[in-house]
Image (cartoon, rainbow, N blue to C red):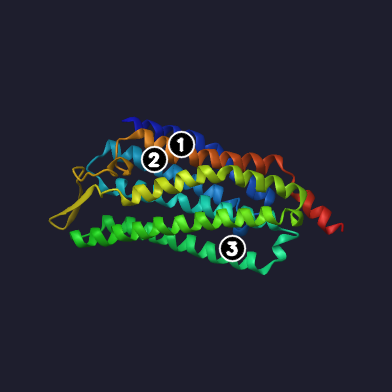
Amino acid sequence: LDARGIISIVVIVIYIPVLLAGVVLSMRHGFARKAGWIYLVILSIIRLIGSVTHILAEQNPTNTTYTTIYTIMEAAGTSPLLVATLGFLMTVAQYGLDQKPQLQQGHKLVSLVALIALILAIVGGTSISSAKTENDLNNANTLRHVSSALFAVVYAAVIFLTFYCWQHKKMIRTYRRKLLMGISITLPFLGVRVLEGILSAFAPLQFAVQDGHVVLAPGNTNALSKFSSQSSAWGIYLFMLVLPEYISVVIYAVVGIVTPLKKDAEDYEGG
């Protein structure tokens, strides 16, 4: 295994506890999608699948299926992390700020954009593996470009909604302010992750079509090649994808574990 393969092994090890923590937090705070905690579980599963297939791809370099799967998983991981953040913002707004209709409408709209971005990322990735012509590859790549751009839009919306919550801090319950602080701390790390996703999407494809079949073609290079999912540049993979994502997840998990959000509900119901 090369450096990225070794990092994939580490990712498997560190995300198993996150998966378990996500299940516990979902049981404690609710499995509802709008609560956000269930997306930590989904992200963990995506990372585990992506890491396993990355290792398999290195051991079977001619198998484009494994490469396609981990490429899709890398891109798709941005979605649950951003949607989780949106869910946490709605949790922050509970019992006060959520009475504002513009917040509810904004959350629904941005969540829809995130869903569209995820679908495009998956369709773009699967279309690469099933391409029959170079034109098919180009069309699939365009879907990846649009997907990454939509994720950037979602991230910008998350920043806006976070500032909106701070502007109306007085309407936010005591313990939910701690969750808002956790969200604010993760924003720079989320920004790095989204930026990496954009640069990766616009990196040259390391695939080509020969005799109607997709094959690996690592000769395609330009200034963005080091951001490709198939690149051996492990530093970018580690510091712009793995670490920012994991730091964000750990912050959310810790805040979720130590913050008694139910006390806000009890105070609200007690008048």
**In this picture, is 263 found above or below 154?**
above
Give the mark nearest the N terminus, 1 or 3: 1
Along the horizontal axis of the image, is 226 left or right of 159? left
Q: Amino acid at mark 2?
A: Val
Q: Amino acid at mark 3?
A: His
**In this picture, is 24 found above or below 268?**
above
What number is the disc on residue 35?
Answer: none
- Whether residue 72 appears in this view of the structure is yes
Give the mark nearest the N terminus, 3 or 2: 2
Mark 2 crowdedness (10 Å alpha carbons): few <14, some 14-19, many ≥20: some
Mark 3 crowdedness (10 Å alpha carbons): few <14, some 14-19, many ≥20: many
Q: Amino acid at mark 1?
A: Ile
- Assess whether mark 2 and mark 1 are in contact (beta carbons under 8 angstroms): yes
Residue under label 3: 107
Along the horizontal axis of the image, is 54 left or right of 11? left
What percent of the width, then of the height, locates residue 80? 51, 52
Q: Quadrant of the N terminus?
A: top left
Q: Secondary structure at mark 2?
A: helix
Camera-side residue of 106 and 242: 106
Q: Quadrant of residue 160?
A: bottom right
Which mark lies nearer to you, 1 or 3?
A: 3
Q: Secondary structure at mark 1?
A: helix
Along the horizontal axis of the image, is 59 left or right of 248? left
Residue under label 1: 12
Give the mark nearest the N terminus, 1 or 2: 1
Q: Quadrant of residue 56?
A: top left
Camera-side residue of 39 and 19: 39
What number is the disc on residue 52?
Answer: 2
